[in-house]
Amino acid sequence: MAFEFRLPDLGEGLTEAEVVEWLAEEGQDVALDQPLVQIETDKAVTDIPSPRAGVLLRRGPVAGTVVAMGAGLAVICDRGEGVDAPDPRDAAPIVGTLPLPLDEKSRKESRSETPARVRAATPASEALPLVRRLAREMGLDLSMVTGTGPGGRVTREDVELAAREGAEPGGPDDEERVRLSKLRRTIAENMTRSWREIPHVTTFGQADATALLGARARLRLPLEALFIRTVLPALRSHPEFNATLDGDVLVLKRRYDIGIAVDTPEGLLVVVVRQADRRSPDELGQEIERLSAAARTRTARPPDLTGQTFTISNIGAVGGALGTPIIPYGTTAILSFGRVQDQPVARDGRVEVAPVLPLSLSYDRRISDGALGRRFLGAVIEQLEALS
């Protein structure tokens, strides 16, 4: 019996995903749990397995299509059947989901019926909000884009094709419009929300890094593991920085799930070291290496990417010194560690050359004044200079 497979609930509050690549062809035999299609959520790329064995009769959304949870993905049937099986591309869209696009053949036929892509089409009000926003970002007049979705509705692919084919007459030919990846769009949305809703204050400091470098050489740990060790005592003595602001209530966290910013080819991701205070130095190092590798290969699980109570960012790894880090939404502070450089320092009335570590602390001004911010940063510096 033909089975219509819909995008399952991926948990963690996710509501949509983008199709990256189909891993099986129409007419191909597929086994139970065989990877069927690769999708991208806000932060991770995931293979969706087949829910049953059979033949992949029809595939729905093509690569690049954003679909909501519950939207049709494919039709799987037993060998020899499928004449009357439903087609997920022809079915009416589920309420709240994006319409599935036509297959490539149908799309080409639709284009051949119109002499030009730019012509009067579906009113902008009938397109979904995401499609209207995309058209605005690309500078397109949506009423001049031909729709190939159900009932002539303009889809995301229609807008992107119109932009590629020059739907706006007279547009400059010395520019290229590049669609942001889903991860980059998510980063932009999160950063915009944090900057808009959190009044940021950034304070700066520096620490003698002699003890830090000695500990790294002796323990052979990633610097991020040592940064976590120095931050934990400061968070215990200044709990306002390991907290969430819920309206007029400051929620002080009694757990220490430390986020670490990881530079990946697709953009900056924050992975979360759970229960960092309960891990030995070696365990911290192993977990940081595991999470960093998963982030760079886009195989991190949703629990690895959400729920941090405080965040550190090693901008020194990419040559940075001081900066103004943006506080992840739902937390109250973030601390950046810059690149260690030799500088002249005063010691016992003498000027010596020593390795110096720059630090940048951004915190929510609603929960802390300048004095408390300086005390917290001072506590971190004290721990750094006393590492053993």
Image (tube, rainbow, N blue to C red):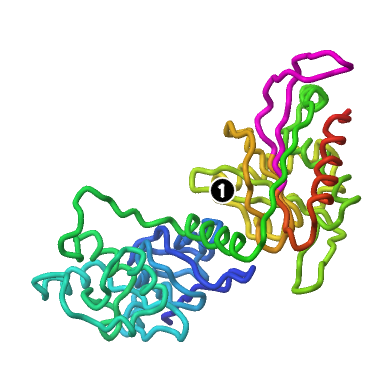
The span picked out in magenta is 337-361
> Is any part of residue 170 visible from this angle?
yes
Residue 352 magenta? yes
Residue 105 magenta? no
> Is any part of residue 76 visible from this angle?
no
- Amino acid type of the residue tagged 1 in the rendering: Leu
330 and 293: which is toward the camera: 330
86 and 254: which is toward the camera: 254
Q: Residue 275, relative to residue 366: is it above or below?
A: above
Q: Residue 73, relative to residue 175: is it above or below?
A: below
Residue drawn at x 20%, y 59% as measured from the top left? 171
Residue 281 locus on image (x, y percent): 83, 37
Find disc 1 in the rendering and name its residue. Answer: 268
Residue drawn at x 80%, y 55% as measured from the top left? 369
Q: Quadrant of the C terminus?
A: top right
Residue 106 locus on image (x, y percent): 21, 73
Q: Quadrant of the N terminus?
A: bottom left
